[in-house]
Structure formats: structure tokens, C-alpha cells
Image: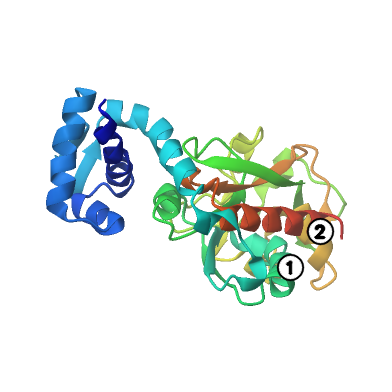
Amino acid sequence: MKHSDYSLIPTFVAIVEEKNYTKAAKRLGISQSAVSQAVIRLKEVFKDALFIRSSHGVEPTQYALDIYPALASAVENIAYMMPEYQRFDPRACDKQFGISSLSVFGFTILPELASLLRRSAPMASMKVEPLYNNEVSSMLRSQHSDLVIDAHSNRYPQLRSKVIMEDTLSVMCRIDHPRLTGNSISVEQFLAEKHVTHSQLDQKSGYLVGRGLKDEAILTKRSIAWQCSSIMEMLPVVERCDYIAVLPQKLVDQYLHVHKLKQLKAQFLLEPIQIAIYWHSSRTNDPSHRWLRSQVELAAMQYSNR
């Protein structure tokens, strides 16, 4: 590679991430013609087609995907060495951050985060949106969201992640449930009852399924009678009906007194749930993003210690 060819690397990274020559050109502040010329030279340098045209733009070849992480990291490291990135003052920050999250964290971690940001970054703002699993990578790559908060799993191998909290699961029912009169529940009783779940647009079996839990096979056999758009909607439904629900223990501890519910011991649901933040690798060294991640970690720690 010639010295002049190194200037083509940001173009390569932008095309892989945008999957569109026009969007890559707009992002880089150059013409689409300049992008096309850069692609021709990149193909000569790497001896590979690199990008294949599709109905919506272009798709990177396997070779392009293989070399992308190293080149994207190089571009990122150089960018954050520039003077404008050397200093970050949260009190002077007026940007809007974005987080995509399961609704449960709107009642647990996120209120703690709001309190932290109000004090340390009073000029900044936050936009929280529902988490749709089929859009996670694209949301983070395009910076539509800065972070995703979700149960930790191997669902997003292409993203960076860090575990920030651990919780367990709890089975809840109404205090005067006609069949569940004791303080525990067996697998047979669990599967015999109707369930309330928190479901997302892109899944029907509840937010706990598909996350690698040891007892997932049991969860997939549930008879689901009611699907809620928010986890907090589950509590009054369980209170008014003979349904049961599986909820995070810390949430149960916080809101059990508000509703006429009781907790049932379930020996088959003892596996802890890890909560993690996910982000795109291109944001790892961004000072403002590092600061945001540290604040979410602190919020999770404060909530866990309450």
C-alpha cells in the first residue's frame, strides 16, 4: 500500500458501516464520485471486490468484513487523538445522548442515571427508546442510539459489551390466587397456569426467551394469556387475574408493596441474569461515550446497593 492509499481507509470504513456510497459520501463530506474512485483504488490495493451492489446499496464481501475491525479501530484511534477530542467536560456538554432499553430499566437503572446526569451534565439531555432486537447493530452503528441496555447474552457478537449488574428471577401471583396457596411453585404448577409476559414487537414468547438461560426450555412451554408492552403493565394484570408472571427480583422488591401480590419460590429459576451495556466498537474511545458508559455503570451500582 502506497502512502497516499492510507487516506482511503476512512472511506472503506464509512462504506462498510453505511452500506451505501451516497450516505458514505455525505458522512465524509466528499462527493459520491470521489467515493466511487476510492472504491476502485481500494479494490486494486486489497485484490478483492470488497463491495457487491444490492437493492438497497452495497454489501461488504467476507474479506471486507474480515479486515473491517482492524481498519475501523485504526480510524477511530486516530480521530480521538485530535485536539477536539482530548478534553471532555460533562458540565459543558449540551449533546443529546440516546439509549435503547428494555422497559424494565426505565424503573430501575435509568432513574438513577437521570439523577446522575442532572447533577454532572446539566446541559445534556437523554432520549430513551424501546429496544427492538432486530435493529440493535444498525442503531448503534448509525449512532441513532449510543448504548443498548439488555440482558447479557451472545446475541450481539459483533458489538462491544460490559456487564453492569446481576439479578435473579421471581415468579409472582395475586395474594388470593385460588390454586397457588403456598409460597412455592413447582414446574408442573408453573406450566399449568396462564402467564403474563413482556413482549417486544420482534418476538412473541417474552423477553427472557432467546438469551441462553438454562431453563429456557421451560419458559418456551408457558401458556401465554396476556402480552404487555411494558414490564410494569404486568403487575396490575397479575393482581386482577389468576395469571402468573416471571419478573426480575430487584423490581419485585421495589414494587411488591404497591400491588396485592406474593412471591413464589421456584427452584427451577435460580440462574442469575446478567445485565449489560452494548455499544459499537467505533465509539469505544470517544471521550463523551466513555463518560456515558461510566455513568450507566455507576447508576447500576447505585441501584443495586439501594
Q: Residue furthest top?
A: 47
Q: Quarter holding the C terminus?
A: bottom right
**Disc 2 from disc 1: Cα separation:** 10 Å
Give the numbered dot on residue 37: none
Quadrant for residue 70, please give it: top left
Q: Is residue 206 left or right of residue 249?
A: left
Q: Residue furthest bottom?
A: 123
Q: Is residue 13 left or right of residue 195?
A: left
Q: Is residue 16 left or right of residue 166?
A: left
Is residue 245 visible in the rendered structure shown here? no
What's the residue at 23%, 25% (across, down)?
46
Q: Position of residue 263 (x, y in %)?
A: 82, 56
What's the residue at 51%, 47% (across, down)?
81
Secondary structure of the residue carrying tag 2 is helix
Q: Position of residue 60 (x, y in %)?
A: 26, 36
Q: Position of residue 286 (x, y in %)?
A: 54, 51
Residue corresponding to mark 1: 116
